[in-house]
Image (cartoon, rainbow, N blue to C red):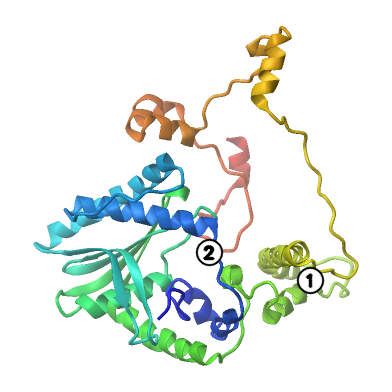
Amino acid sequence: MGEHALLSASSSHRWIQCPPSARLEENFENKDSIFAAEGTAAHALAEYKLKKYLGIKIKKPKSEFDEKELEYYTDIYFDYACELIAEAKIRSKDPIILVEQKLDFSNYVKDAFGTGDLVIVADKILDIVDLKYGKGVDVSAAHNPQMMLYAIGALNLFDSLYDIEKVRMTICQPRLDNISTFEITVDDLIKWAEDVVKPKADLAIKGEGEFCAGEHCRFCRAKFNCRARAEENVKMAQYDFRKGPLLNDDEITEILSGIDELQKWANDIQAYALDKAVNENKKWDGFKLVEGRSSRKYSDEEAVSKTLIDAGYKEEDIYSKSLLGITAMEKAMGKKKFKELLNNLVYKPQGKLTLVVESDKRPEIKNTAELDFK
């Protein structure tokens, strides 16, 4: 199995929902992004911290990214992991604690395996912990297929050694202050693997099954010109407005349910077309490349400062001073000192009201009039 597996755990939410997409993606280059490289650096540092804590000799990794930021956010993951390890040691005398462990689930997905950031095996509970360093969107552990496949791999290794009744899966996403946990019984997990994963994997390997557009298209390499995704979104764009001069509530609800995906699809098409025009000199009928608007910038800030000081201007006239933002201040001071000195001077204002689908994990706001009053 190569570095980029056909049916990886990380892409399982996609090939389970849309089995033929796995083979379709083979037609596109798998490019690593700067965000992926940053995530790799965070995982390497987190691995170092946990292995050092467990008494395993390991060399501290070097990184091209902001070291203070990496240290700060991986500490949040490390602290949480240590809490789980301490809890496991209370339940069992000799829990198995593994960092960056290879987990094989090929009994359900041919030739497939993944790497668990942290696996803790003790009586009654199997813990699977995954560090997500991204900050684009909250990732939930609830029925997360990547985590569930890792859990299957861990059960394959250790179920016969320990009396495991349930699996607890946790996603730690420190840059979004998101720690999401989901529990499932071993029986339900195995049933899911048998009834859902295995048949979908068999279809995906053959390139068979129905194409299905949805939220899972987000990281698909074929998302820019996938016909199934286009057809799904064009249906929304061509909504039948001829039934009357005003939309009724049901029609508005139907439009709301698909509008996010429609906007994402439109942005993806625009990005794809621009990339082709810029990098491959592609000419799209009816369109042309132009320079976008830009703002004036100093070519040399030090020279500007010296020129103005020499001309008699004072520093307070040409420089602005502002307080560090909360995250930057916390990093500069350290979490403990920040909390000691500023905890009572920090608050979180009410977020702007927004309309989301019912599956969103945020609690529903019932009384907007009361919020307005507050």
The amino acid sitting under disc 1 is Ala
Q: What is the secondary structure assignment of the residue under circle 1?
A: helix
Q: What is the secondary structure assignment of the residue under circle 2?
A: loop
Residue 282 placement: quadrant: bottom right
Label 1 neighbourhood size at 10 Å, few (<14), some (14-19), many (20+)?
A: some
Marks 1 and 2, how far apart at CA:
32 Å
Q: Is residue 63 visible?
A: yes
Residue 179 placement: quadrant: bottom left
| Percent position of residue 186, x then y | 28, 77
Q: Is residue 335 above or below residue 341?
A: below
Q: Residue at x 75, y 67 (%)?
A: 280
Horizontal side of 315 relative to 266 (left or right) equals left
Of residues 357 and 234, the one drawn nearer to the viewer in this rendering: 234
Q: Residue at x 54, y 85 (%)?
A: 19
Q: Residue at x 25, y 77 (%)?
A: 155
Q: Is residue 137 visible?
A: no
Label 1 vs 2, first from the N-terminus? 2
Q: Which mark is residue 32?
A: 2
| Percent position of residue 264, x then y | 68, 64
Horizontal side of 187 relative to 159 (left or right) equals right
| Percent position of residue 5, x then y | 45, 78
Q: Which mark is residue 237?
A: 1
Q: Is residue 15 above or below residue 337?
A: below
| Percent position of residue 260, x then y | 67, 63
The amino acid sitting under disc 2 is Asp
In the rendered image, the quadrant that contains the N terminus is: bottom left
In the rendered image, the quadrant that contains the C terminus is: top right
Can you name the residue that lies furthest to the left here?
93
